[in-house]
Image (cartoon, rainbow, N blue to C red):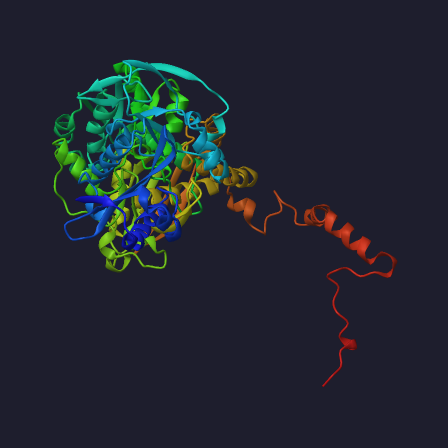
Amino acid sequence: MYIRTARPTDVPALTALVNEHARRGDLLPRTAESIHASLAQWLVGIDVEGDLVACVALFVYSSALAEVRSLAVADKVKGMGYGRTIVKALVEQARLRNIPTLFALTRAVPFFQKAGFAVTNMNRFPEKVWRDCATCPLIHACDETAVVLHLGPIPATIPIPIPMKAAQRKQSEIIPKPIKREKGVLQMKQQQVNKVVLAYSGGLDTSVIVPWLRENYGCEVICFCADLGQGDFELEGLREKAIASGASKVYIEDLRHEFAKDFLFPMLQSGAVYERQYLLGTSIARPLIAKWQVAIAEAEGADAVAHGATGKGNDQVRFELTYKALNPTLKVIAPWREWDIRSREDALAYAKKFNVPVVHTEKSIYSRDANLWHISHEGGILENPANEPEESMYQFTTAPENAPDESEVVKIDFEKGVPVAVNDVQMPPAELIATLNEIGAKHGVGRVDLVENRLVGMKSHGVYETPGGTLLYAAHRELESLCLDRDTVHYKEQMSVRYAELVYFGKWYHTLREAMQVFIEHTQETVTGWAKLKLYKGNVMTIGRSSPHSLYREDFATFGQEDVYDQSDAVGFITLFGLQMKVKAMMDVSDGGKSRYASPDYSKFKRD
């Protein structure tokens, strides 16, 4: 890459590069006019094809202070070191101009730390705060960190101010920390971490997180993988891969039974369904994974936990709320909110740099999450909710039109609201769900195409396959219709909406959810019996239900019997039940008025 000062002919390409990153939320937007007026401040990088692929600006506040701003690198050269190269050139330019101090406001703190910058307090730069930050619309929600580079001599240790948000800038808390030098580069971290337990899946992202944690936090990394029924393929070679990536130890725990018994079945008893369709397969799994992370951290004496959830989705909240509920003293590291890896290509380049073993597989256009309960699909053509999902996308279920031409009947037995047998064969929880998955999937049952409201505020479009869960919810609902009275059923239906929100929002360990569970368990005391379902080409039809605690009695329900219910009693009941409506109407018609529902006087209409 050839680096030079920007020229007038660079303005269109320079503006496009900066504003593409601004559109992603990485930079502040710049107009062509403002760039043209400040060309002398800009350095640009030109590749061998003559394209402008990198840029950065040096904004000078005084002879003693300058800001590094608008650093951008084109996607086609990400991971090739162009960002580091152009920042190094800018630092040399500042050094030649005898500017002793450089600073930047950034979300890519590790990137700048590798270039020798140190985390500091934004209040050290009042020139920036009063010039730009005071008018910024995000001043009270700033998520940028100040970093500084001293080009003059640096003492062995100096007090390092903690990073502060805009809303905290009136404070001036100082924490002294030593500065470590390695090969002439200044390296520091905001948090001191000795040992971290990482939620590890073996995919590209979490594989890269292992060396990233070691490089940026200098800590020991223990990997934890939960077997929740995602399949042997995803677990194959996982331990060896984690160790090769730099992990000191790997835990792989078979949690399928605990997942089914202590998480899925209590949720089934509640009847929780998020936004009328989603059976919460991903949401309900995260608290269990996080619970085991905390347990392993405590057993290993770790002082931190980490996850690979992005900063845009729901999972980051689900993991971290569980950490807070179970052990709030643990530090939480979320690399996606810190690092400068922004693409699969970036991750592959990082993996290559640290010799992380990455199995070459064709990248799916879909983002998926699978476990014993379901599989979800997002991304690809699903980003447009008007598109019909491709049949090749589905992993569990047969297309309804390709399902067997003969229907199948499945019988599910329950004891106190907990499923215990399929077709009169008793099974442990995980095996029971797996059996129903196989039966339901064969008949195309359990497909849901949903536009849902994420916790973070945006909408997302996903497709879910939950064949066994769909059958269990249908059977459980039918058995409750026999065993619970009207008021309990109706109140429980209202509660299930709130319960689903708590699960979706990651509040499994919230006291409200736990209190709800006590009530729900009480309602299930009589929910014992069986329900039969007929499956045919994606449809689930109830064909029978029975319970020794059934509240349905044929002799009570018949209109011919008078022993239990005298039909003449209805007169008084209806009078009292409708008394409010009657009083309102009587008030309307008093003094010659009319009820608002009075029939119109057709005699006043003219005839043609």
Depth check: 249 or 288 in front? 249
User: Which residue is at 27% across, 13% downward?
Assistant: 156
Q: Say which quadrant the N terminus sits in.
A: top left
- For residue 427, say whether it is visible: no
- For residue 584, say whether it is visible: yes
Q: Residue 176, position in %: x, y?
A: 36, 14
Q: Say which quadrant the C terminus sits in.
A: bottom right
Instruction: Give the quarter of the image for residue 536.
Output: bottom left
User: Would residue 174 appear left or right of 151 to someone viewing this image?
Assistant: right
Depth check: 398 or 278 in front? 278
Q: Residue furthest right?
A: 591
Q: Residue 559, position in %: x, y?
A: 58, 52
In this view, 76 is above or below 229: below
In this view, 266 is above or below 277: above
Depth check: 154 or 328 in front? 154
Q: Residue 70, position in %: x, y?
A: 33, 41
